[in-house]
Amino acid sequence: MTARRQLVVMLKEPRPGRVKTRLGRDIGMIGAAWWFRHQVAGLLRRLDDPRWHLVLAVAPDHAGQISRAWPAHLPRIPQGPGDLGDRMGRILRTMPPGPVCIVGGDIPGLGPAHIDRAFGLLGAHDAVFGPAPDGGYWLVGMKRTAPPPATLFRNVRWSGEHALSDSIASLPGLRIGLADRLNDVDSAADLP
């Protein structure tokens, strides 16, 4: 039997001043939180697909138990402490066996076909990234036939033009596939 695909969406509680703060500096913290809440609602409707198991990785950790911002039927796990690499690495190490892809909630153009293609790349690759035009990425995935290497996400310069290249460099010897190129939203200039 083939292990089930797991799609994890990393989300922060949509509260003003706690989510999309760079966007908030451009459009106001309340506007940024409102945008994120509605963006995530549409994204989760699009990505709730029988081809994979959809899981929400939430922050703060207690938000998983109390938040009404997300659909109640979707399972939630805490992101836990640390930087983005620590949190994504923990997800990739602790999810049930099988392929895992992780995305954020701030990718307006993301749909099921993008996710399906990314999982498809894991057939011939150990890991997959979905590049963003700014040098970062909107998706990371691993086949997980072996535990992720200890070097995973080590020395990555987050939130900048080197995030993708540094993340790929943290996986020496692994076959890396690149999925579709999509925009995420960090500032008002990124809004569709």
Image (cartoon, rainbow, N blue to C red):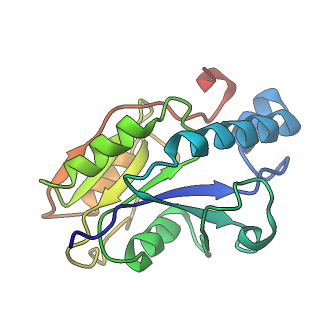
Does the rendering let one see residue 157? no
Is 9 placed left or right of 64 in the picture? left
Is 82 placed left or right of 149 in the picture? right
Is 110 placed left or right of 23 in the picture? left
Q: Residue at x 81, y 69 (%)?
A: 66
Q: Considering the image in quadrants, where does the C terminus appear?
A: top right
Above or below: residue 151 compared with residue 169: below
Please tell me in which quadrant of the rendered image residue 43 appears.
top right
Work out whether residue 119 or residue 104 is closer to the camera in this orientation and state it: 119
Q: Residue at x 40, y 56 (%)?
A: 52
Q: Residue at x 67, y 36 (%)?
A: 39
Where residue 136 appears, x then y in whole percent?
A: 43, 42
Q: Considering the image in quadrants, where does the N terminus appear?
A: bottom left
Where residue 72 appears, x then y in whole percent?
A: 71, 61
How many numbered markers are drawn? Answer: 0
Work out whether residue 168 or residue 161 is closer to the camera in this orientation and state it: 168
Where residue 62 appears, x then y in whole percent?
A: 76, 74
Does the rendering let one see residue 187? yes
Work out whether residue 164 or residue 45 is closer to the camera in this orientation and state it: 45
Please tell me in which quadrant of the rendered image residue 145 appears.
bottom left
Above or below: residue 130 compared with residue 102: above
Where residue 59 appears, x then y in whole percent?
A: 69, 65
Is 148 placed left or right of 124 in the picture? right
Q: Residue at x 56, y 66 (%)?
A: 83
Above or below: residue 156 compared with residue 178: below
